[in-house]
Image (cartoon, rainbow, N blue to C red):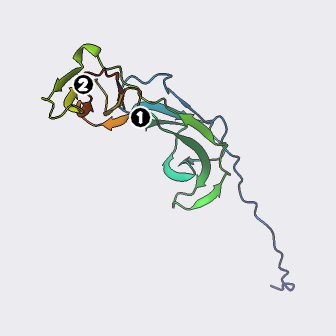
Amino acid sequence: MACSNPITVTISVPAPTLSAPIGVQITGIPSVVTSNTPITATLVFNLVSGANKYGIYSNGNLTSYTTTNSVSLQLSPGQSGSVQIRAFLVASDGSIIAQSPLSAAYAFSVPAFIPGQVDPSTINVSWQTPTNAQTVIGTLSWGAVNGASGYQVSLNGGSPTTVNGTSTQISATPGSTLQISIAACS
């Protein structure tokens, strides 16, 4: 068999392209949080034609992968941030054939849990016997508020002091009047 001299040509094989996911949102974030426990919300987005895997980015960092367009999230009261999605076409051997640009960022914010108020009927001061005419020491105590992790206590409109328990030492001038403010905090 007789053959001509071979010719060599170079052709480009187009790489698949993926568009950035759209429709990114988080559903199920309540407008009011009633406890200090995490809430379950759902991250959803539109699937991208040709993609078989999706990267979830939280505040710019890759946190997990999924093959579906609906992912359950655990979010904490007071948590805020942003999520983005990147679509991938992954070969059976795990290698990445194509990836999309990141989706637009979806910003979210979970309301902070705000505990109820201290019951005024639980506020008590146990005064010690004054040791001088200028100062008397007392123990201010109050009933715990469900879900509170601490309290802010102020006397006579002064700067609040953070208290981790349900009592604190106070001092006053004998014969004076005190205005006591206690706020439960989470």
28 in relation to 161, above or below: above
Crowd around label 2: few <14 · some 14–19 · many ≥20 (10 Å): some
Disc with the residue nearer the chain's start (1 vs 2)? 2
SS category of the residue bearing label 1: loop
For this view, does 91 lie left or right of residue 163? right
Residue at left offset 65%, top offset 49%: 102
User: What residue is pinned by disc 2?
Assistant: 144
Q: Kindly tell me whether residue 165 is visible in this rendering.
A: yes
Nearest-to-viewer mark from 1 and 2: 1
Q: Residue 73: horizontal and vertical position, in percent?
A: 45, 37
**Neighbourhood count class around disc 1 (C-alpha, 10 Å): few under 14, some 14–19, many 20 upward:** few
Q: Nearer the viewer, residue 181 or 11?
A: 181
- State the image quarter where residue 82 is shown: top right
Q: Secondary structure at mark 2?
A: loop
Task: Please tell me whether residue 111 is drawn above or below residue 117 in the rendered image.
Answer: below
**What residue type is disc 2 on?**
Ala
x then y, percent, for residue 110: 49, 32
Q: Is residue 134 left or right of residue 1?
A: left
Is 76 left, or right, of 80 in this rendering? left
Q: Is residue 55 above or below residue 162?
A: below
Q: Is residue 44 visible?
A: no
For badge 1, the amino acid type reads: Ser
Task: Tell me the quarter of the image containing the N terminus.
Answer: bottom right
Report the front residue among 25 and 128.
128
Find residue 164 and report its image quarter: top left
Which residue is denoted by mark 1 in the rendering?
A: 159
